[in-house]
Amino acid sequence: MTGLSTLPATLYARMYFIRRFEETLLDLFAQGKLVGTTHTYIGQEANAVGIVDHLEPERDVVFSNHRCHGHYLAFTDDAFGLLSEVMGKATGTCGGKGGSQHLCRGNFYSNGVLGSIVPVATGIALAEKKKGTGAVSTVFLGDGTLGEGVTYESLNMASLWQLPVLFVVENNHYAQSTPIELELAGSIAARGSAFGVEVAELDTTDVAEVHETAGWAVARIRETGEPFFLVLHTYRFSPHSKGDDNRDPGEIEKRRERDPLQIAGDRLGPAEREGIEQAAEQRLAETVAAADEAPAAEAA
Amino acid sequence: MSAPSHKRCVQALNEGLHEVFAERDDVYLLGEDVLDPYGGAFKVTQGLSDAFPDRVLTTPISEGGLFGVAAGMSLRGLRPILEIMFGDFIALGLDQVVNGISKFREMYDDQVTVPLVVRTPMGGRRGYGPTHSQSLEKLLLGIPNICVVAASECHDLGGLLANAVDDDRPVFFIENKLMYGRPNRRPEEGHIGELAVRETGTRYPALTFSGTDFTEASATIVTYGGMVPIVLDAVTELILERELFCEVVALSQLLPMELEPVFESVARTGALVTVEEGTLTGGFGAEITARVQEEAWSDLRRPVQRVAARDGIIPSARPLEDAMLPSAGDVVEAVVALEAVRS
C-alpha cells in the first residue's frame, strides 16, 4: 500500500485488497483448496480500514473475533501469513494451528468464541495502562456478541477502571442466520452510555465517515485514557460463513447499492483506481501462488 | 513431635503473597472484597492492598469477565493473581479457561504465554451448602495446557504460591477452606509427627508419608489438599487399632499428572486407595486408577479402591453434609476392605 499519495487512495487500496482477498478465499474453498471454515468480511471493509488507520501497530493492540480477516489485514498487512494459515500451511500466522479465526501476530489477536474476547481486550487495556504505554486496546464485536453477558461485565470494568478500550460494534444485522429483530432488544448505543462510556454511532458504508469518527474516538481515548463505544451499522454481502445464506437476495442487492468499495472508488480518478486494483490483483495472485507452494503444517 | 508454634496456613499464604509482591513488580492481584481492612473473604490478602495499593484491585462480582481480564493482563507481560472467593464460582470462568487461557499459547504457535494464577478455596465441612462447598478440581483435570496445584497443610504453602507466580503456564492454585485455620505443619528432620516424610524436589512437590520408614506397607493412599489431614488421621487409626501400615502420597500438582511417587509407593505396597473430596464419578481417583493400571499393573496385587464424595449435592445441615463427604472412617474402611481381597 505504499506510494499512494492521498488518504482516499490509501483507504481504497486497503479496502479493495481485503475484498479481493476474501473473494479469493471463497473461490479457493469452492475449488477444494481450503478446509475448515471462514467468515468473510465482504461489505464491512470500510470499518476495519477506517478505524485501524488511526492505530499504531507497534503500540496499540487489536482483539478481533471470528470475522477477523479484514481487521487482521488492515492492522498487519500480512496477507501471506493469513492465507497460508487458512490453507493449513506451516508458514501460517500460527503455523496452521489456529486457522481462520484464531490469529496472532504482534499486537493482533483473534479468537472464535463470541464475547470471550471482550474481557481479554479489557485486561489488555488494564495491563497497558499499568505499564504506561499509552496503547489503545481495540476490540471488534458484532450485534450477535451483544447477546453474551460477559460483554457487559467488560464494559462495566472498562468504565469503572477508566481503561483505554475502543469497543467497536459492527452491527451487520445478522447473528449468523438470525436477523437482529430476533436477537437483540433495545438500543445498541445505550448499551455503552448505560455504563458511562462515551458513544458515537454511524450508519454508513463511507470509509471517509468511519475514518473521521474513528479518528475522533481514538483521539478521545488517548486524551482521556477512558473507553469509547463506537457503533457502526453495516452489512455483510457474503454469507455468514461459506454457503449458508437464507437472506432475501433483494435485501442484499439493495445493500449493495451502498457498497463501500464503490463509494470509496468513486472518489478516485479512473487511472488511479485502476492502478490500485491492478496492483492488488497482482499482489493477491503472488500471495496465492506463494501460499500454495508453501509447505503444509506437519505434526511434530 | 508436633510443634505448636507452626504458623497457620492462611498466614503462610499471606506471607507468600507479600513476599512475591515485594520481589516482583509485575504481579497484580484481582478479586472481590480483597481490599484492606477486609482483606478477602478468607483473609488471605490481608495487608496486601495497604502495602501495594496500585497492584491490588478490588473488582465487581464478575468472575466470567475477570478470568478474561487476567488473561489479557498476562498476554501483555504482567503476572496477575486472580482470587475467586469460592471455588464453586470457577464455573463462571470456565469459558475463558477452556477457550482462551489454556489455548492461547499453543494455538498462537508459542508466540505468547499466559502466566496467570487463579487462587481459590475448595471444600466443604463448614455447612455452606451445595454451591459454596464443592471440590471441583476434576472439572479442571480434563483441560490440557493448564497446571492444577492443590497444596495441603503439610506443604510449603508460601513457596508453592511463589512457584505458581513464577510459572509461565496458567496455574490454578487450589486452597482449602478448613486448611486456612490449621497449622502449616512442615516436615522436621524428615518427619511429621510419627510418620517419616519424603518430599520430591519438583516445583510442586509430592509428599510421601510412611509409618514403616518406607519398607513394607499394606497400601498406598494417594490424595491431596484438604483430605490430607483426614487421611493422616485414618492412617493413625489403622496403625493403632488394626496394626495396618499405609503409605500416603499427598500430591500438590494434580495436573499435569506426574505420578512417579505413586508408582514408587505402589511398588512397595502393591495396593492403592485414591481419596478425594470431590464427587466420585469421572474424578481424580478415576484418572489415577487408569494410569496406575497402565504403568504399574505388575505391582498391583489388589483392585484399586476409590474414596470420594457421593455423586450428589453437599447439603448444608451438618449430619447430611457429613454423610455426603468422605471421612477418615471411609478411608479406614477402604483399606480394611482391600485387606480382605486376595488376588
Image: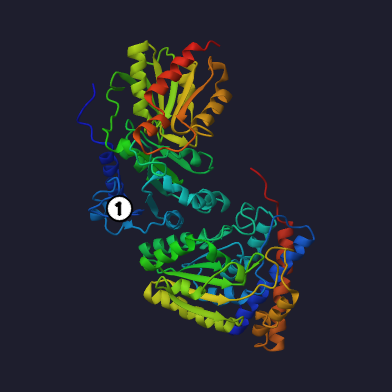
Vertical position of residue A229 compared to residue B77: above or below: below
Give the image quarter of residue B209.
Answer: top left
Residue at left offset 28%, top offset 40% = B10
Q: Chain of mark 1?
A: B
Residue at left offset 47%, top offset 22% = B273
Name of the residue lying farthest toward the right:
A31
Vertical position of residue B154 compared to residue B296: above or below: below
Vertical position of residue A11 compared to residue B165: above or below: below
- The answer, for residue A236, to whether it is visible in the render is yes
- Kindly identify which residue carries mark 1: B34
Quarter holding the N terminus of chain A is bottom right
Quarter holding the C terminus of chain A is top right
Mark 1 secondary-structure assignment: loop
Vertical position of residue B249 compared to residue A273: above or below: above
Residue at left offset 39%, top offset 14% = B245
- Residue type at mark 1 is Val
